[in-house]
Image (tube, rainbow, N blue to C red):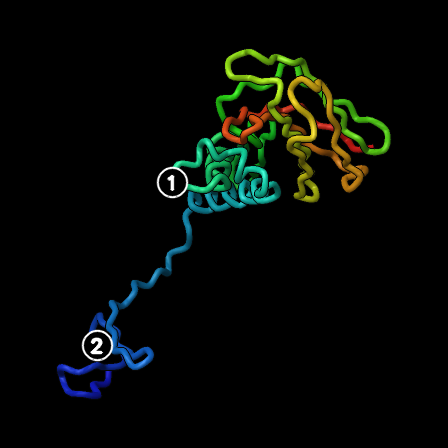
Amino acid sequence: MGTFNKGILGGFSGKVGTVIGGNWKGIDYMRSKGNKRNLAPTQAQQAQQLKFGLCVRFVQSMSGLVETSFHNFAVKKTGINSALSYTLKNAVTGTFPTFSIDYSNALVSRGDLPNVLAPSIVMGAGSMLNYAWTDNSGVGIAKATDKAILVAYCPSLNQCIYTTGSATRNTLTDSLNLTAFSGKQVETYIGFISADGFNVASSIYTGTATVS
Protein backbone atom coordinates (compact mmCIF):
# COMPACT_ATOMS: atom_id res chain seq x y z
CA MET A 1 0.00 0.00 0.00
CA GLY A 2 1.26 3.51 -0.83
CA THR A 3 1.96 6.16 1.83
CA PHE A 4 1.24 9.88 1.16
CA ASN A 5 3.75 12.06 2.97
CA LYS A 6 2.66 15.54 1.81
CA GLY A 7 -1.04 15.27 1.24
CA ILE A 8 -2.90 14.16 -1.81
CA LEU A 9 -0.93 16.47 -4.12
CA GLY A 10 2.46 15.54 -2.70
CA GLY A 11 4.80 12.67 -3.39
CA PHE A 12 4.11 9.17 -2.15
CA SER A 13 5.95 5.93 -1.69
CA GLY A 14 4.76 2.42 -2.40
CA LYS A 15 1.99 1.15 -4.67
CA VAL A 16 -1.34 2.83 -5.30
CA GLY A 17 -3.42 0.86 -7.76
CA THR A 18 -1.31 0.41 -10.89
CA VAL A 19 1.14 3.21 -9.98
CA ILE A 20 4.30 2.95 -7.89
CA GLY A 21 5.74 6.05 -6.19
CA GLY A 22 9.09 6.72 -4.66
CA ASN A 23 11.82 9.26 -4.04
CA TRP A 24 15.32 9.29 -5.49
CA LYS A 25 17.85 11.88 -4.32
CA GLY A 26 15.04 14.11 -3.06
CA ILE A 27 13.05 13.86 -6.28
CA ASP A 28 9.56 12.35 -6.17
CA TYR A 29 8.72 10.02 -9.01
CA MET A 30 5.92 7.78 -10.19
CA ARG A 31 6.00 4.83 -12.56
CA SER A 32 3.51 2.27 -13.76
CA LYS A 33 3.53 -1.17 -12.26
CA GLY A 34 5.19 -3.76 -14.48
CA ASN A 35 3.27 -6.76 -15.73
CA LYS A 36 4.24 -10.10 -14.25
CA ARG A 37 5.46 -12.75 -16.68
CA ASN A 38 5.01 -16.26 -15.41
CA LEU A 39 4.82 -17.93 -18.81
CA ALA A 40 7.59 -20.36 -19.73
CA PRO A 41 9.32 -19.57 -23.05
CA THR A 42 7.86 -21.33 -26.07
CA GLN A 43 9.90 -23.83 -28.06
CA ALA A 44 10.33 -21.24 -30.80
CA GLN A 45 11.71 -18.77 -28.25
CA GLN A 46 14.05 -21.39 -26.82
CA ALA A 47 15.24 -22.26 -30.32
CA GLN A 48 16.00 -18.62 -31.06
CA GLN A 49 17.91 -18.28 -27.80
CA LEU A 50 20.04 -21.35 -28.62
CA LYS A 51 20.78 -20.09 -32.14
CA PHE A 52 21.63 -16.64 -30.86
CA GLY A 53 24.00 -18.04 -28.25
CA LEU A 54 25.85 -20.10 -30.87
CA CYS A 55 26.30 -17.11 -33.14
CA VAL A 56 27.40 -14.80 -30.33
CA ARG A 57 30.16 -17.24 -29.35
CA PHE A 58 31.43 -17.49 -32.92
CA VAL A 59 31.35 -13.77 -33.67
CA GLN A 60 32.77 -12.65 -30.32
CA SER A 61 35.81 -14.87 -30.83
CA MET A 62 36.84 -12.54 -33.68
CA SER A 63 35.16 -9.32 -32.55
CA GLY A 64 38.23 -7.20 -33.24
CA LEU A 65 38.22 -8.36 -36.86
CA VAL A 66 34.52 -8.20 -37.76
CA GLU A 67 34.19 -4.70 -36.36
CA THR A 68 36.28 -3.69 -39.37
CA SER A 69 35.61 -6.48 -41.86
CA PHE A 70 31.81 -5.96 -41.75
CA HIS A 71 31.85 -2.16 -41.63
CA ASN A 72 30.45 -1.84 -45.16
CA PHE A 73 27.23 -3.48 -43.95
CA ALA A 74 27.12 -1.86 -40.52
CA VAL A 75 24.40 0.66 -41.33
CA LYS A 76 23.11 2.11 -38.04
CA LYS A 77 24.74 -0.82 -36.24
CA THR A 78 28.22 -2.02 -35.27
CA GLY A 79 30.30 -4.37 -37.39
CA ILE A 80 29.85 -7.00 -34.69
CA ASN A 81 26.07 -6.72 -34.87
CA SER A 82 26.19 -6.92 -38.65
CA ALA A 83 28.30 -10.10 -38.49
CA LEU A 84 26.00 -11.56 -35.85
CA SER A 85 22.93 -10.86 -37.95
CA TYR A 86 24.46 -12.47 -41.04
CA THR A 87 25.60 -15.57 -39.14
CA LEU A 88 22.21 -16.03 -37.48
CA LYS A 89 20.39 -15.76 -40.80
CA ASN A 90 22.70 -17.80 -43.01
CA ALA A 91 24.96 -20.14 -41.07
CA VAL A 92 22.88 -21.95 -38.43
CA THR A 93 21.85 -25.52 -39.14
CA GLY A 94 20.07 -28.32 -37.26
CA THR A 95 16.76 -28.76 -35.47
CA PHE A 96 15.69 -27.96 -31.92
CA PRO A 97 17.38 -28.48 -29.53
CA THR A 98 20.52 -29.43 -31.48
CA PHE A 99 21.85 -26.54 -33.52
CA SER A 100 25.31 -25.91 -34.91
CA ILE A 101 27.07 -23.45 -37.20
CA ASP A 102 27.67 -24.47 -40.80
CA TYR A 103 31.10 -22.90 -41.09
CA SER A 104 31.09 -23.16 -44.88
CA ASN A 105 28.17 -20.69 -44.94
CA ALA A 106 29.63 -18.27 -42.41
CA LEU A 107 31.53 -15.12 -43.35
CA VAL A 108 34.38 -13.45 -41.48
CA SER A 109 34.40 -10.46 -43.83
CA ARG A 110 31.76 -9.02 -46.14
CA GLY A 111 31.83 -6.53 -48.97
CA ASP A 112 32.01 -5.92 -52.71
CA LEU A 113 35.77 -6.06 -53.21
CA PRO A 114 36.62 -9.09 -55.41
CA ASN A 115 38.25 -11.90 -53.50
CA VAL A 116 41.17 -13.85 -54.96
CA LEU A 117 40.87 -16.90 -57.21
CA ALA A 118 41.44 -20.53 -56.21
CA PRO A 119 42.48 -20.03 -52.57
CA SER A 120 43.79 -23.14 -50.81
CA ILE A 121 45.38 -24.18 -47.52
CA VAL A 122 48.04 -26.74 -46.56
CA MET A 123 48.99 -27.64 -43.00
CA GLY A 124 52.76 -27.30 -42.73
CA ALA A 125 55.41 -28.11 -40.16
CA GLY A 126 55.54 -26.25 -36.88
CA SER A 127 51.77 -25.68 -36.77
CA MET A 128 51.98 -23.29 -39.72
CA LEU A 129 48.85 -23.04 -41.86
CA ASN A 130 49.96 -22.07 -45.35
CA TYR A 131 47.64 -20.22 -47.73
CA ALA A 132 48.04 -19.86 -51.50
CA TRP A 133 45.92 -18.09 -54.11
CA THR A 134 45.88 -16.72 -57.65
CA ASP A 135 46.34 -12.99 -58.13
CA ASN A 136 43.42 -11.31 -59.90
CA SER A 137 44.49 -7.69 -59.59
CA GLY A 138 42.65 -5.47 -62.05
CA VAL A 139 39.39 -7.42 -61.89
CA GLY A 140 36.77 -4.88 -60.88
CA ILE A 141 38.25 -2.76 -58.10
CA ALA A 142 40.78 -5.43 -57.04
CA LYS A 143 44.29 -4.04 -56.59
CA ALA A 144 47.67 -5.64 -56.03
CA THR A 145 47.95 -3.70 -52.78
CA ASP A 146 44.80 -5.19 -51.22
CA LYS A 147 45.68 -6.83 -47.90
CA ALA A 148 44.95 -10.47 -47.05
CA ILE A 149 42.69 -11.41 -44.14
CA LEU A 150 43.53 -14.92 -42.92
CA VAL A 151 41.37 -16.55 -40.26
CA ALA A 152 41.47 -19.84 -38.34
CA TYR A 153 38.68 -20.53 -35.86
CA CYS A 154 38.93 -23.38 -33.32
CA PRO A 155 35.43 -24.54 -32.33
CA SER A 156 36.55 -26.67 -29.38
CA LEU A 157 38.29 -23.69 -27.76
CA ASN A 158 35.99 -21.02 -29.19
CA GLN A 159 39.07 -19.02 -30.10
CA CYS A 160 40.24 -17.39 -33.29
CA ILE A 161 43.63 -16.52 -34.76
CA TYR A 162 43.68 -14.05 -37.63
CA THR A 163 45.91 -11.63 -39.43
CA THR A 164 45.33 -8.67 -41.73
CA GLY A 165 47.90 -7.06 -43.90
CA SER A 166 50.91 -9.35 -43.55
CA ALA A 167 50.53 -10.17 -47.26
CA THR A 168 48.99 -8.44 -50.27
CA ARG A 169 46.96 -9.77 -53.20
CA ASN A 170 50.01 -10.05 -55.45
CA THR A 171 52.08 -11.86 -52.79
CA LEU A 172 50.23 -15.11 -53.62
CA THR A 173 51.02 -16.81 -50.28
CA ASP A 174 50.91 -16.20 -46.54
CA SER A 175 50.84 -18.22 -43.32
CA LEU A 176 49.21 -18.34 -39.90
CA ASN A 177 51.06 -19.63 -36.85
CA LEU A 178 48.58 -21.91 -35.07
CA THR A 179 50.81 -23.26 -32.33
CA ALA A 180 48.13 -22.32 -29.78
CA PHE A 181 45.75 -24.74 -31.55
CA SER A 182 48.15 -27.69 -31.74
CA GLY A 183 46.23 -30.96 -32.16
CA LYS A 184 42.92 -29.13 -32.64
CA GLN A 185 40.64 -28.85 -35.64
CA VAL A 186 40.19 -25.40 -37.18
CA GLU A 187 37.84 -23.81 -39.69
CA THR A 188 39.65 -21.51 -42.12
CA TYR A 189 38.85 -18.46 -44.24
CA ILE A 190 40.48 -15.91 -46.49
CA GLY A 191 39.32 -12.38 -47.28
CA PHE A 192 40.82 -9.10 -48.47
CA ILE A 193 40.63 -5.44 -47.54
CA SER A 194 41.83 -2.47 -49.56
CA ALA A 195 44.95 -0.63 -48.47
CA ASP A 196 42.85 2.33 -47.31
CA GLY A 197 40.56 0.02 -45.32
CA PHE A 198 37.45 1.17 -47.18
CA ASN A 199 36.62 -1.81 -49.43
CA VAL A 200 36.28 -5.35 -48.13
CA ALA A 201 35.87 -8.70 -49.88
CA SER A 202 33.38 -11.31 -48.75
CA SER A 203 35.45 -14.12 -47.28
CA ILE A 204 35.89 -17.55 -48.85
CA TYR A 205 35.75 -20.67 -46.69
CA THR A 206 38.97 -22.58 -47.28
CA GLY A 207 38.09 -25.72 -45.37
CA THR A 208 38.89 -27.63 -42.19
CA ALA A 209 42.39 -28.51 -41.04
CA THR A 210 43.89 -30.34 -38.07
CA VAL A 211 46.79 -28.42 -36.62
CA SER A 212 50.01 -30.43 -36.46
Q: Which mark is residue 76?
A: 1
Quadrant, the C terminus: top right
Label 1 residue SS: loop
> Residue shown at 24%/72% (left/top)?
30
- Amino acid carrying label 2: it is Val
Return the x and y of residue 159 as percentages of the image width and height.
67, 43
Seen at 65% across and 14% down, the residue is: 135
Identify which residue is drawn at 58% across, 18% down. 143
Q: Residues within 10 Å of mark 2 (few under 14, many from 20)?
A: some
Earlier sequence position, callout 1 versus callout 2:
2
Image quadrant of residue 148?
A: top right
Task: Please tell me whether residue 97 is drawn above or below residue 109 in the rendered image.
Answer: below
Q: Are marks 1 and 2 in contact (CB under 8 Å)?
A: no
Question: What amino acid does circle 1 point to?
Answer: Lys
Q: Position of residue 2 (x, y in %)?
A: 24, 82
In space, the residues marked 1 and 2 are separated at their CA atoms by 41 Å
Q: Is residue 124 above or below residue 14?
A: above
Q: Toward the viewer: 178 or 16?
A: 178
Which image quarter is the N terminus in? bottom left
Q: Which residue is mark 2?
A: 16
User: Which residue shows up at 44% across the image and 32% down it?
Assistant: 73
Q: Is residue 208 above or below residue 47?
A: above
SS at mark 2 in the image: strand
In-image side of 86 versus 150 (left or right): left
Numbered marks: total: 2
Residue 147 appears at what percent x and percent y? 62, 26
Closer to the camera in the image, 6 or 208: 6
